[in-house]
Amino acid sequence: MRNWNDYKEYVKKTDKKSGKELEEIEEQAKIVSILINQRNALGLSQRDLAEICGIPQSSIARIESFKTTPNLSTLIKLLKPLGLKITIS
């Protein structure tokens, strides 16, 4: 294996359960990355976003560092002030 993508493909082919877990982690990482990038683009700190959303700053820090996964209502609270929305396809 030469790189991370090669490894991911290997795992997906050889271990279906781990492959699915890896795909879920990648999807979560995409969402969190978009949240962080948009928050930064708007010039908001975690504390600023927390005040706007009415949730603790520590919760945002845990979400952004992948220490916790937000429930749907928390995710929606975070998305709205960032001008983002969930699209299901």
Image (cartoon, helix red, strand yellow):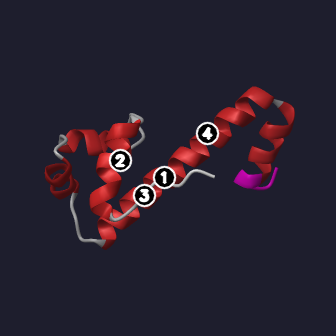
From this view, report whether residue 65 is shown above or below residue 85.
above
Q: What residue type is labelled 3?
A: Lys
From this view, report whether residue 24 is shown above or below residue 41.
above
From this view, report whether residue 68 is shown above or below residue 48.
above
Q: Which mark is residue 24?
A: 4
Q: Earlier in the sequence, mark 4 or mark 3?
A: 4
Q: Which mark is residue 31?
A: 1
Q: For label 2, count other residues whose C-alpha is less than 10 Å away and answer few (under 14), some (14-19) or many (20+).
A: some
Q: Which of marks 2 and 3 is nearer the N terminus?
A: 2
| Separation of marks 2 and 3 at Cα, in angstroms | 7 Å
Q: Which mark is residue 85?
A: 3
Q: For label 3, count other residues whose C-alpha is less than 10 Å away and answer few (under 14), some (14-19) or many (20+).
A: few
| Separation of marks 2 and 4 at Cα, in angstroms | 19 Å
Asked if marks 4 and 1 touch (Cβ < 8 Å), the reply is: no
> In terms of secondary structure, what is the magenta stretch mainly?
loop
| Rendered residue at 16%/57% (across/down) | 48
| Separation of marks 2 and 1 at Cα, in angstroms | 12 Å
- Please state which of the two labelled residues, at mark 4 or mark 3, is closer to the viewer: 3
Asked if marks 3 and 1 touch (Cβ < 8 Å), the reply is: no
Depth check, front residue: 66 or 4: 66
Give the magenta-colored segment's residue range.
1-5
| Residue 18 magenta-highlighted | no
Q: Is mark 4 on a helix, strand or loop?
A: helix
Residue for badge 2: 76
